[in-house]
Image (spheres, helix red, strand yellow):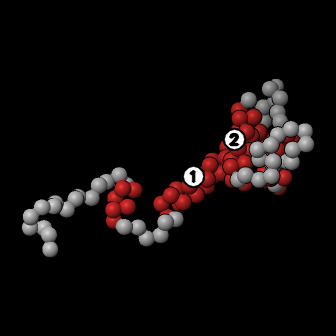
């Protein structure tokens, strides 16, 4: 059961990584195959999961090692996606004013008081 959840998580990250491609929204008998399903990574991962399926009576050390490698790979994919999202948010705008930077971190700059004596 945990292996199926792990496989779905990895395939979800591959789908998010590839972005929308042909057949991303259409489903049905004549719909094109999504781009991520044609990738070498998708084919390799599904092949490895199918090859190393274990029945409930069989317990082997290699299965636990493969499960650990798969969970580590899913963590890597999630971390890369989150890193790219953060990089887009904080580093893609170029030079920013001090007012924009203060708003970005949740601060407000003090306002210049108006009134007599401040005009030039």
According to the picture, the residue beneath numbered tag 2 turns out to be 9
Residue 65 in view of the camera: no
Image quarter of residue 63: top right
- Residue 89 point in image, percent of width and height: 50, 58
At numbered mark 1, what does the secondary structure look like: helix, strand or loop?
helix
According to the picture, the residue beneath numbered tag 1 turns out to be 82
Residue 38 in view of the camera: yes
**Residue drawn 13% across the image and 67% down it:** 118
Q: Which quadrant is the C terminus positioned in?
A: bottom left
- Residue 24 point in image, percent of width and height: 77, 47
Residue occupying the far bottom of the picture: 120
Up-down relation of residue 31 to residue 95 (above or below): above
Residue occupying the far left of the picture: 117
Other-residue count near label 2 (Cα within 10 Å), few / some / many at <14 / 14–19 / ≥20: some
- Residue 42 point in image, percent of width and height: 80, 49
**Residue drawn 80% across the image and 43% down it:** 26
């Amino acid at each position: 059961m945990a292996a199926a959840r792990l496989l779905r998580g990895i395939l979800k990250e591959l789908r998010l990584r590839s972005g929308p491609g042909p057949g991303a929204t259409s489903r049905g008998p004549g719909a094109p195959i999504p781009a991520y399903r044609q990738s070498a990574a998708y084919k390799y991962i599904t092949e490895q999961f199918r090859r190393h399926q274990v029945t409930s009576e069989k317990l082997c050390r290699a299965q636990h090692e493969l499960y650990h490698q798969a969970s580590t790979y899913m963590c890597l994919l999630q971390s890369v996606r989150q890193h790219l999202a953060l990089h887009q948010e904080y580093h893609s705008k170029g030079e920013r004013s001090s007012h924009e930077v203060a708003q970005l971190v949740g601060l407000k700059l003090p306002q210049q008081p108006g009134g007599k004596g401040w005009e030039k």
